[in-house]
Image: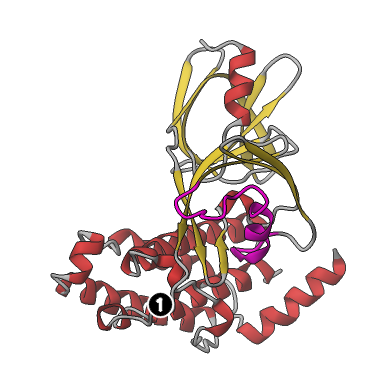
Amino acid sequence: MSDQHTLRTQLRALVPDTVVYVSWITADETVYQRGTILNYDPTTMFRHIETDDRTLLLSPTAEEITVSEITASGPTRLGRLNSITYDNRPTEPLRVTNAGIDVPSYLVGYTGQLLVSSGKRQELCHIAEPPLERYDTRLFVELDTVLPSNWHETTLVIQPLGGPRRKYKLIDDRRADEYTPEQQQYTALETIIVTVRELSEAVYADTRLEARTSKRIERKLFALQSQLLDIHQALFEPAPSEHPLEVDEVDTYSWTSYTDAIEWLEMQFEEIRNRITADKTFAKERLGVSPLGPTVFASLEEIQQTLDEHPDQSPTEYSSSTTETVVDQ
């Protein structure tokens, strides 16, 4: 069993998308669970872990680190954390694109100080409001203080204050290439991704849905969007950031109801899946096999069954609901 100091050190290193294996001790046994870190706040050591069937919360106290399950009524204690293991990350690419640096996911939305080092140079950079976006030129400006004049393929270490140290290799992807004919046939993915995002926003803003129902649907849509973004990135390699997904510039599908949106998504998924399956050259090289398997359609069917219990809500309705929600907060 790991001692408390080691556990706290390991807990502090956990960042979003890290695959972790945790165990905890109950009165009768030791329980093991695999999951993925959901969020990251450098000011705390609390971590949320999403497993196949529930969300766990790791929360340190003076005596121990508690493992709880997030339920509708609040956290339910499961036991005392016994061990943490996770997949160590090697040097990661940090891509410089025409739209700015492709910001790592755990730094999107970040403001504050970053400790950046390259070779013998080390600087404390400051990210002021507004928070970092997915593609952000400000981060490159800040990193420039420690970069050599010929910075291509430079290795950097970046650490938010109180957060984990991550090692990156800068990759210059600033190009003006257009989509190739092979990529052009998959540009519909961008409209699909934006539609999934709009559907998620509508569910979030729909006050007629119970919080637990809304959260369950949002989680499924989030997982679906992550999978679509991975497919989009793979198909547009070797420089995915060469064509950053700027959602404001993407053609959108004007859905009028939950049912309309889900039926359209099912049709589009079927079309994209068939196209990937039939593409024995480009798509097979990039993806191997079609990633849009039966679970994708099962998720959409489950979402539809849940929403069938509620009147349809159109995008115009949820945009006004969102405004009211923000005002109330």
Q: Which residues are magenta?
A: 132-154
Residue 175 x/y as whole percent? 44, 73
Report which residue position mark 1 lands on: 265
Q: Residue at x 86, y 71 (%)?
A: 327
Which element carries disc 1, helix, strand or loop?
helix
Residue 207 x/y as whole percent? 71, 69
Label 1: how many residues lie within 10 Å, few (<14), some (14-19) or many (20+)?
A: many
Q: Residue at x 68, y 62 (%)?
A: 138
In this picture, residue 63 sits left or right of residue 276: right
Q: Residue at x 20, y 60 (%)?
A: 289
Residue 253 x/y as whole percent? 49, 87
- Of residues 219 and 117, the one nearer the viewer is 117
Q: Residue at x 77, y 63 (%)?
A: 130
Q: Quadrant of residue 128?
A: bottom right
Instruction: Give amino acid for label 1.
Output: Leu
- Of residues 247 and 204, the one nearer the viewer is 247
Q: Residue furthest front?
A: 149
Residue 136 x/y as whole percent? 63, 65
Quarter placement of the C terminus: bottom right
Would residue 311 be seen by someone viewing this image from the given angle?
yes
